[in-house]
Each structure stands twice: as structure tokens, then as C-alpha cells.
Amino acid sequence: MSLSSNARTRSRLLRRRFLRRLGWTLVVLLVLAVAGELVAASVFRNRPTRYLVGDFVRGEAVWRENDKFMYRFFRPRAAETPPPLVAAAERDTNRVFRIAVLGDSAPGGWPTPAYSLSRVLPAILPETADGRTLEVLNLCLQEGNSHVLREVARDLARLRPDATVVLLGNYEMAGPCGPAAGFGRLHNSSRLARAEILLTRFHLVHALRLLGDRLHPKHADQEAWKNREPISMARRMPPGDRRIGLAHRAFRRNLEAIVEAAGASSGKVLLCTVPVNLRDSPPFATTFSANETLAQQVRETLRRAAKEEAAGNDAAAENLYAAVLALDGTHAEACWRAARLAGRLGKTDQARTL
């Protein structure tokens, strides 16, 4: 009994000593992190992490875009610049009706910003029914997905729009934290991806990233170039890939947070879907069967089908496309070509299914 009691006492003492050391280690790390953040914030004070920054124009307080906002998600050489924005911090709500458009490249009008919603809306609706002037603010980002735009939505409270239009979804797979993106290493968990995004709010993270780029310039060059490459073969995903479902789950959570922030700041939210012209929207990429013999048979049959269609032999082409899809039912190019032919032949339901 005495030996057993001594062993238990010793075990408790060792456990307490370990917990005490762990606690002090965490305290020291926290102090170092806070000190490092304060130093980094003073060194990189020209790199704010919020989407909007305060400024003065002709003596009037305004909010304007942070041209380095996307540095949080991409290396500076690969980061897109947000569209210009200048909004009065205080406005006469009896004279001005303010709309914020939050989205990706579709409502942003890329590659021609003149066709953005922020330019089109005032042209077709110069004033509201009660005579107020329409002010439309462009908060759209090229390569901005729900992970990024959730951070932009934080600043809707600063703008206090009368209404917010939300239209996004084009970059959920290939944008930051998307399963097809280099930045999306943690895409298998939406919570881990969210934590990764939250870390980019700290200047210390930027300082460590810049230090890493200085120490490994070749790696930084590869990452910058990789961001501009099409989706590689290794990152292509067939319809049944589980990562697609995980990306959908993250999109839903982020979208709910965005709508909640928009509703809290404006009360009126117009939630839109991504407009897609299916007939003229070919697939980004095709996945191929791991069986090379089957993949080669699919390629040859598809080549014959396209040749027959080009020659005007629609019936033969239709049969060959059906043969391709019997071999590989998720071959994206074959699905699209067969759908386009079915639509031209008036088989609308079949075209839509494909």
C-alpha cells in the first residue's frame, strides 16, 4: 500500500510539473506572438488587413479600398487589385440610396469593369422611386470566393448600405482554400480553412511569409507562377469526388455568414445565383480513366464523333457520343459535345441532363 501510494503521489507531482511547464511555455509563446504582432504591425503599417481603410478627400472622411487586401491570400506578384472605391463615411440617407454589390468576377464585370453591376445599375436606374440618387459600390474581387468575401463582408457595417446584392460562387473550387487551389491544403475541413483565413488578419503571418520567400526565393517564384496556371491534371475532380461536397459545405457556411453580416448592416439583401450560359460554357477540364486502354478508346471514339459532327452527319455523331459516354459516363468534353448536339437537334431535356 505504501509503495502504491508513493507511486500515485509521484505521478501527480510529475503531472502537475508537466502542466505547469506547459502553461508557462504557452504564456511565453503568447507573449512572443503579441510582441511579434506589434512589431510587424508597425513595420507593415502600410499593409492593413481590412478591406476598407479610412481616408480624407477634400476634408471629408471617406472609406476607400485597401489595394493590398488580396496580399492576405496571394503573394504580391499574383494578387489582384480590388476595384477603386470611395464612399463617404457619412451620407444624407434622404438624398442617397446606397447599394453594395458583393461578389466575384461575374458581378465585377471582369475583364471589362464597365460591364459591372456597379456601372450598369446607375445607368438603368439613375434614381429610386422616391427621388433619391442611386450610389452603387463595387465590392467585387477577381478570384474572390466565399472564404475571401466573408472577410470583405465585415466592412459592410462601415458602409451601412441601404441594400446589398450578393452574387458569388465561381471560385469555390479554384480560389483560396478551394480544393483545386495551391492555397487549399486545408480544404478537407471548412473549420481549418476558416482558421487559416483568420490567421491572415495578423501582420505577423505576413512577416513570416515574406521571410520564407526571402529564404526560399525559388519556391516563391514557383508558387506565384502556379497561381496563374490552369488547374493541373493532379487537381482535376470528377463529379463524384468527395472534395466537391466538402467545398459545397464550406460555401454554405460562408454564405450564411455573409448574408447575416449583410442583413445586419443593411437589412435588405438580394441573394443571386451565378448566371451561366450552359450552351456556350465548355468544361474547364476533363478527367481521364486510369485504364489507359479504355482512355485511348474514348479519345479515338470522341475524335471520330467530332469529325462526323463537323461533316454534318448528326446521326452518326450522336451514336458515337453515346458510345463514348457508355465507356466513360463522366467524360466532361464528351458530355458537353453530346449536349450541344442534342440541343441543336431539339432534344432539350436530353441536352439539359447532359
Image: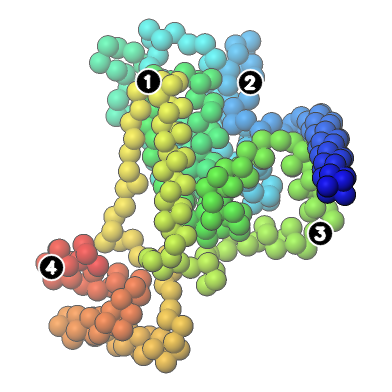
The dot on residue 212 is none
Q: Nearer the viewer, residue 180 or 191?
A: 191
Which amino acid type is shown beneath numbered disc 4? Answer: Lys
Which amino acid type is shown beneath numbered disc 1? Answer: Gly
First-in-chain label (3 vs 2): 2
Q: Does 176 appear above or below 313?
A: above
Relative image position of residue 28 (x, y in whole percent): 86, 35
Relative image position of residue 112 (x, y in whole percent): 45, 45
Residue at mark 2 to residue at mark 4: CA–CA distance: 56 Å
> Is residue 22 among what the camera can see?
no
Determine contact: label 3, label 2, CB under 8 Å.
Answer: no
Q: Residue at x 27, y 11 (%)?
A: 130
First-in-chain label (1 vs 3): 3
Q: Nearer the viewer, residue 288 or 47?
A: 288
Which amino acid type is shown beneath numbered disc 3? Answer: His
Q: Residue at x 83, y 53 (%)?
A: 214
Task: Give the residue number, with chain letter if any, for mark 4.
Answer: 347
Task: Give the residue number, with chain letter if any, for mark 3.
Answer: 216
Task: Give the residue number, with chain letter if any, for mark 1.
Answer: 267
First-in-chain label (4 vs 3): 3
Residue at mark 3 to residue at mark 2: CA–CA distance: 35 Å
Q: Which SS class for mark 1?
A: loop
Residue at mark 1 to residue at mark 3: CA–CA distance: 48 Å
First-in-chain label (1 vs 4): 1
Mark 3 crowd level (few <14, some 14–19, many ≥20, 10 Å Cα) = few
